[in-house]
């Protein structure tokens, strides 16, 4: 449970800011350690409890240059004095060890760098090439078990526990996503605030791989709540991946659409580097009514005129200011009765709508 001073279910940003403020109060850094509590109740109702203090480390307001979060958000400000690196960082030796274990994980499922290993074996060559089934592929738990076998990699197994046995164990499974459908929607709402970025990143990675399969086929990927991927609670690796999609998707016959309710959120990481890059790589930009604070943020990254600043504050529902290249156009969107029924959910159990 994420709880501080009685407040529960804090998100990453709230937790990080709390500890950064506490560190500021003591000069910017402090020694710290994690304490593990274990309690067991026997069949007579008697409770046995023990606490274990883990190895001390340094917490500092100077964040890691690498924003990748392999464990908790506090890894960004936790420094291992013995290894001389932040908790979220891997040195070249560690990367090589993890890659070795990944290769071993696939090898045990008879999957190698040979593409033919991805297909079922058919000695008589009657049925031709048939892709292996999901159950023939490794899952996270297979990698977890291999980590546990080696003293050097047990620490990585610990990082995977939330994904194997904890609140995020839904990642430890075979995919059931059908990628041949014309319309694929990844609803990650029920993942919870803490897990959303993992789910969003995973699905986007899967979808982008699908998009790259056929350059002749037209397709589009829509990224709602994109601030979760390029905002302050994200990291450089994820934000860089999203930027790569916007920069390269056209050459695969695709298009990408970023959606957010608060424009300032997409400029909150790395002084807006990723938000600005995505905005610059978007040929069409659509802005609905904005508050004064958001307009001030937007004018730092676009060429809004004084007249447009006034107009964008007074836009009504369905109205927007659209940028198409150098043209700025006021647009009013009106939906048809059919679209209205679909959006509002009317008669959803009585009719099936198909679109081509």
Image: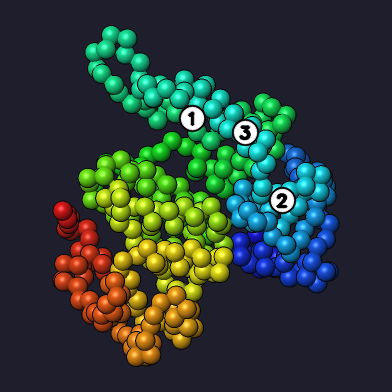
Q: Quadrant of residue 348?
A: bottom left
306 lies above or below 62 = below
Where is residue 5 shown, x and y percent of the image?
Answer: 72, 68
Pick out the residue farthest to the top.
Answer: 124
Q: Secondary structure at mark 2?
A: strand
How far apart are the two marked residues, 2 and 1, measured between alpha carbons? Answer: 30 Å
- Please give the label number shown on residue 86: 2
Q: Is residue 250 left or right of residue 25?
A: left
Mark 2, residues whose alpha carbon is within 10 Å: few (<14), some, or many (≥20)? many
Q: Quadrant of residue 7?
A: bottom right
The residue identified by callout 1 is 138
The residue identified by callout 3 is 96
Q: Quadrant of the N terminus?
A: bottom right
Earlier residue among tags 3 and 2: 2
Q: Secondary structure at mark 1?
A: loop
208 lies above or below 16 = above
Residue at the (39%, 24%) spot, across then down: 115
- Please give the label number shown on residue 241: none
Earlier residue among tags 3 and 1: 3
Q: Can residue 234 be seen by looking at this rendering?
A: yes
Q: Is residue 22 left or right of residue 211?
A: right
Say how the picture is coloured.
Answer: rainbow
Q: Nearer the viewer, mark 2 or mark 1?
A: 2
Where is residue 325 shown, x and y percent of the image?
Answer: 29, 71
């Amino acid at each position: 449970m994420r709880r501080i001073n009685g407040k529960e279910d804090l998100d990453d940003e709230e937790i990080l800011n709390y500890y950064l403020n506490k560190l500021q109060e003591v000069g910017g850094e402090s020694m710290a350690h994690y304490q593990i509590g274990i309690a067991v109740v026997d069949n007579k109702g008697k409770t046995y409890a023990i606490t274990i203090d883990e190895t001390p480390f340094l917490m500092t307001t100077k964040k890691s240059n690498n924003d990748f979060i392999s464990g908790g958000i506090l890894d960004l400000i936790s420094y291992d004095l013995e290894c001389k690196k932040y908790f979220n960082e891997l040195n070249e030796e560690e990367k090589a060890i993890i890659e070795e274990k990944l290769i071993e994980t696939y090898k045990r499922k008879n999957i190698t760098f040979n593409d033919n290993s991805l297909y079922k074996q058919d000695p008589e060559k009657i049925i031709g090439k048939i892709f292996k089934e999901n159950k023939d592929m490794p899952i996270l738990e297979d990698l977890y078990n291999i980590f546990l076998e080696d003293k050097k990699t047990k620490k990585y197994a610990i990082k995977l526990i939330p994904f194997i046995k904890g609140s995020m164990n839904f990642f430890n499974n075979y995919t059931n996503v059908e990628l041949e459908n014309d319309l694929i929607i990844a609803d990650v709402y029920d993942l919870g605030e803490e897990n959303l970025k993992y789910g969003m990143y995973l699905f986007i990675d899967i979808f982008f791989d699908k998009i790259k399969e056929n350059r002749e086929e037209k397709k589009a990927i829509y990224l709602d709540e994109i601030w979760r991927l390029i905002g302050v609670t994200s990291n450089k690796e994820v934000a860089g991946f999203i930027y790569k999609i916007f920069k390269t998707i056209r050459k695969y016959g695709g298009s990408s659409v970023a959606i957010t309710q608060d424009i300032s959120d997409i400029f909150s990481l790395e002084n807006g580097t990723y938000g600005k890059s995505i905005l610059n790589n978007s040929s069409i930009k659509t802005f609905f009514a904005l508050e004064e604070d958001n307009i001030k943020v937007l004018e730092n990254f676009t060429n809004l005129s004084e007249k447009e600043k006034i107009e964008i504050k007074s836009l009504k529902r369905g109205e927007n200011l659209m940028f198409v290249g150098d043209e700025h156009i006021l647009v009013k969107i009106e939906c048809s009765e059919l679209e209205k029924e679909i959006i509002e959910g009317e008669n959803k159990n009585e009719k099936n709508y198909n679109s081509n």
